[in-house]
Image (cartoon, rainbow, N blue to C red):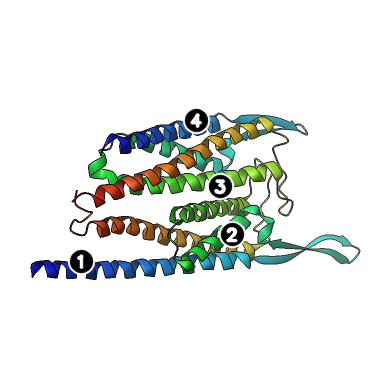
Amino acid sequence: MGEEKLTNIISIKRWRVTTIVILLRVLALFATATATIVMALNKETHTFAVATIGNTPVKLAITAKFQHMPANLMFVIANGVATLHSLLMITIMCFVMIAAVCGAATTVAFIGELARHGNAHARWNKVCDNFERYCDQASGAMLASYIGVLFLMLVNVINVFEHGRLMSPSKSPLSA
Amino acid sequence: MNKTQWIPIVCLRVIAMASTFVATVVMITSHDSAKVLGMTFQAKYNNSPTLRYFVVVSIIATIYSFGALFVPPKKLGRHVLVLDLIVMSFLISSFSAAVGIGQLGKEGNSHAGWIPICGQVPKFCHHVTASLIAGFVAVIIYFLLVLYNLNNVLSLVAFKA
C-alpha cells in the first residue's frame, strides 16, 4: 500500500516537472522568435544635410540595415535556428543551441557598445547618435535573446537532473 | 568512479587550462604602434572592451579548470557540471565577441565608416589572431569536457541503486 502511494507521488512529480519543462521551452521559443523578428526588421533611414549650395542644402539619405553588420546577420541566423529547434522540440542539439545563441548575443552586445560610444583609439566613430531607433531596436532584440538563453539553460539543467531521476526513480538525485 | 571515466576528463581539463593560459598571455602581450601622419597610433588589448572581456574570461577559465581538478567527483559531480556549463557559455561568448571585433579590425565596415586597422598595426593583428586560435582550442575542449562530464554524472546517478 505504501509502495503504491510512493509511485503515485513520483508520477505526479514527474508530470509537474514535464509541464514546467514544456512551459520553459515555449517561453524560450517566444524569446528567440522575438529576437529574430525584431532584429530582422531593423532598418532606419536618416537624411543628412551634407553641404549647402547657395540657399538649398544638399541632402544625403543613408540607410542602416541589419545585414550591414555580419554580427547582426549571425545573430538573426542563430536565433532563427534556435526558434526552429524549439518549435520542433528536438533535444539533440541542446548544447550547441545554447552556445550559438549565447555567442551571437554577446557579439551583438559588444558591437552595439562600439556603435554607441565609438572607439577613439581605432578612430571608429559613433553611429548611434544618428540612428537612435535602429540602435534601440537592436538592443531590444539582444535583450530578448539573452532571456531566451536563460530559459534554454534552465531547460537543459532540469533535463539533466530529471533524466537521472527517471532512470533510478527510488533515489533522489539531490542526495549524495 | 573508475579510472576509464576519470582520466579523459582530467586530460581535457589540463589541456583546456593550458590553452586558456596561452590565450591570456598572448593577448596581454599584444602591443604595436604605428605613425600615421605624424601621430603615434598605439594598439593595445586595453583599448577594446571586447578584448579585455576575453582576457578576463580566459583568466577565470584557467583558474576554474585548475580548481576543478581537485574536486571529489562523487560528491560534487553535479555542481561541477553546472559550473562547467556556465564557464563554457562565458568562454564561447567571449571568443565569439572577440572574433567579431577582430573581423571588424581586419576588414572594417564601409556602412558605418569604420576603416580597418590591421594595415597599420599588423603585429598587433597577428598577436590577436594567435590568441584567438588558442581560445578556439579552449572552446572545443570545453565543449567535449561538458559532454564527457554529463555522461559521467548521468551514469553515476543512474547506477547509484
Disc 2 crowd rating (10 Å Cα; few below 14, some 14-19, many 20+) is: some
Closer to the eye: label 1 or 2: 1
Q: Amino acid at mark 4?
A: Val
Q: Quadrant of residue B13?
A: top left
- Give x and y (percent) for residue A149: 45, 58
State the residue position of label 2: A77
Q: Are marks 2 and 4 in contact (CB under 8 Å)?
A: no
Marked residue chain, label 2: A
Q: Earlier in the sequence, mark 1 or mark 2?
A: 1
Q: CA distance from mark 1 to mark 2?
A: 40 Å
**Is label 3 or label 1 in front?**
1
Please tell me which residue is depicted at 39% across the width and 33% down the height of the picture.
B11
Image marks 4 and 3: residues in contact by CB distance under 8 Å: no
Question: Label 3 sits on what residue type?
Answer: Ala
Front: mark 2 or 4: 2
Residue A94 image point, x, y percent: 44, 56
Alpha carbon separation for disc pair 2 and 4: 31 Å
Q: Quadrant of residue A78?
A: bottom right
Q: Chain of mark 1?
A: A
Q: Is residue A48 left or right of residue B20?
A: right
Chain where mark 4 sits: B
> Can you tell which of label 4 and label 1 is closer to the viewer?
1
- Tell me which amino acid carries mark 2: Ile
For the residues tagged 3 and 1, is the chain the same? no
Residue labelled with disc 1: A10
Q: Residue at x 71, y 42 (%)?
A: B116
Mark 4: which secondary structure? helix
**Residue position for label 4:** B22
Please rate how many residues cluster around mark 1, counting C-alpha atoms within 10 Å: few if below 14, some from 14 to 19, many from 20. some
